[in-house]
């Protein structure tokens, strides 16, 4: 029987070169609508196990302990009428979203209910996948990975970089958010250049879905090579200065490539001004 070290969380950590043992964990971040889910799906098609933070949050809202705490905090207005008689009431996420993204204290209160449970779910899933060697790679797809401090579970952080205009167009097509709703969610997150600076890999999503898949194939090669990973990788075609996203100038990109590896680097100072409280 292998002997496993215990982690502070009480989870057993099987032996291996990565933070959580034999399987590396990769955090996926990027702007809203940048294509994180698409990248996650392409990695899943190659064999990665994907933890979708949005979906895990939704599942928790559907379970009694979290749902009851949410209703106790926000009132019955955040409940949707049951579709059928006798059915358990469900949280109306649209209504709850309207509330929390218009008032920071409410968002913090919702996070205080959900985030500890979400983290526990991630930790358990990572521990299980590592113990049973269920996949060669775990992907934690979480827009607010850095803001929530979940990056401490990750061996690498990948930023999906898409031009703001493409993100807006795609979201207008795929979701029913107004520009104001999108702006309110973005305001609740770190600015993109701050997120990008904390990533050690960047995948540029500025073309077709086929182009993105080809880039994810290269990312996969990079992520599944033997440890230790070093340096910073940008996955895109030949640099084209006109097609870059919102905030990164060619000079930024060059300097970011020269950055030291993330692992072991001290955390940067807390965010100032816009957006979320420091963590
Ligand atoms: C407020 C809720 C009910 C709205 O649900 P809805 O179905 O409209 O949105 P969904 O959960 O699919 O989130 C879509 C996007 O909104 C943004 N977003 C969601 N929660 C947050 C948050 N706490 N802070 C900043 N942005 C957020 C993310 O970019 C996310 O990808 C829901 O987002 C929620 O419960 N949020 C708190 C839990 C959480 O932090 N989830 C985000 C994990 S990445
Ligand atoms: N290169 C692309 N070409 C065309 N459509 C795309 C491309 N990339 C993403 N999309 C579409 O844009 C929409 C948003 O993408 P996706 O859901 O992957 O973004 P996301 O980063 O996961 O968003 P969120 O932050 O809300 O979780 C989806 O409908 C997706 O299919």
Image: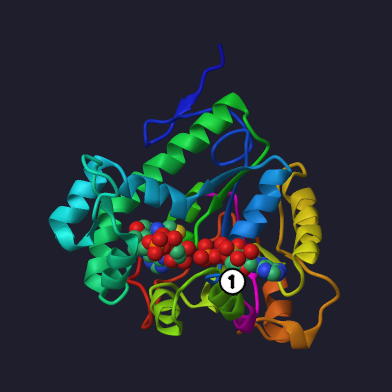
Tell me if the residue at label 1 has its CB under 8 Å from ligand 2.
Answer: no
The single residue placed furthest to the right in the displayed view is 238
**Which residue lies at the image location 75% right of the left edge and 57% below the top edge?**
216
- SS at circle 1: helix
Residue 26 place in picture, x, y as percent: 60, 50
Q: Is residue 169 magenta?
A: no
Quarter residue 189 falls in: bottom left
Q: Which residues are magenta?
A: 154-166
Name above or below for residue 95 compared with residue 274. Answer: above
The C terminus, quarter of image: bottom left
Quarter occupied by residue 261: bottom right
Return the residue found at the far front: 85
7 vs 101: above or below: above
Q: Residue at x 27, y 45 (%)?
A: 84
- Asked whether 221 or 255 is in front, the reply is 221
| Residue at 49 percent of width and 47 percent of height | 153
Provide residue 19's location: percent of width, then percent of height. Answer: 55, 41
Give the residue number, with chain letter if any, for mark 1. Answer: 196
Vertical position of residue 268 compared to residue 181: above or below: above
- Image quadrant where residue 104 sits: bottom left
Q: Quadrant of the N terminus?
A: top right
Kindly tell me whether residue 73 is visible in this rendering: yes
Residue at the image point whose x is 66% and y is 81% from the top: 245
Determine whether, in the image, residue 269 is placed left or right of residue 49: left
Reply above or below: 33 against 8: below
On the question of residue 258 being in view, the answer is no
Q: Position of residue 120 (x, y in %)?
A: 38, 41
């Amino acid at each position: 029987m292998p002997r496993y070290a215990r982690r502070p969380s009480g989870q057993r950590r099987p032996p291996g070169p990565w933070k959580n043992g034999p399987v590396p964990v990769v955090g996926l971040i990027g702007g809203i609508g940048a294509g994180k889910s698409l990248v996650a799906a392409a990695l899943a098609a190659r064999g990665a196990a994907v933890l979708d933070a949005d979906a895990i949050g939704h599942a928790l809202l559907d379970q009694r302990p979290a749902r009851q705490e949410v209703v106790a905090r926000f009132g019955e207005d955040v409940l949707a009428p049951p579709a059928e008689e006798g059915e358990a009431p469900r949280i109306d996420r649209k209504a709850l979203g309207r509330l929390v993204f218009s008032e920071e204290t409410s968002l913090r209160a919702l996070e205080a209910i959900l985030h500890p449970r979400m983290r526990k779910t991630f930790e358990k899933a990572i521990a299980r996948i590592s113990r049973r060697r269920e996949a060669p790679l775990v992907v934690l797809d979480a827009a607010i990975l850095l803001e929530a401090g979940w990056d401490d579970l990750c061996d690498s952080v990948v930023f999906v970089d898409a031009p703001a205009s493409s993100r807006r167009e795609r979201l207008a097509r795929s979701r029913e958010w107004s520009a104001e709703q999108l702006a309110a969610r973005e305001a609740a997150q770190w600015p993109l250049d701050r997120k990008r600076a904390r990533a050690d890999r960047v995948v540029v999503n500025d073309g077709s879905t086929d182009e993105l898949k080809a880039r994810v194939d290269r990312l996969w090669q990079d992520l599944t090579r033997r440890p230790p990973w070093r340096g910073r990788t940008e996955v895109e075609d030949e640099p084209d200065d006109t097609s870059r996203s919102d905030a990164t100038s060619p000079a930024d990109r060059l300097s970011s490539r020269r950055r030291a590896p993330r692992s072991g680097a001290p955390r940067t100072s807390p965010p100032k001004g816009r957006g979320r409280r420091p963590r």
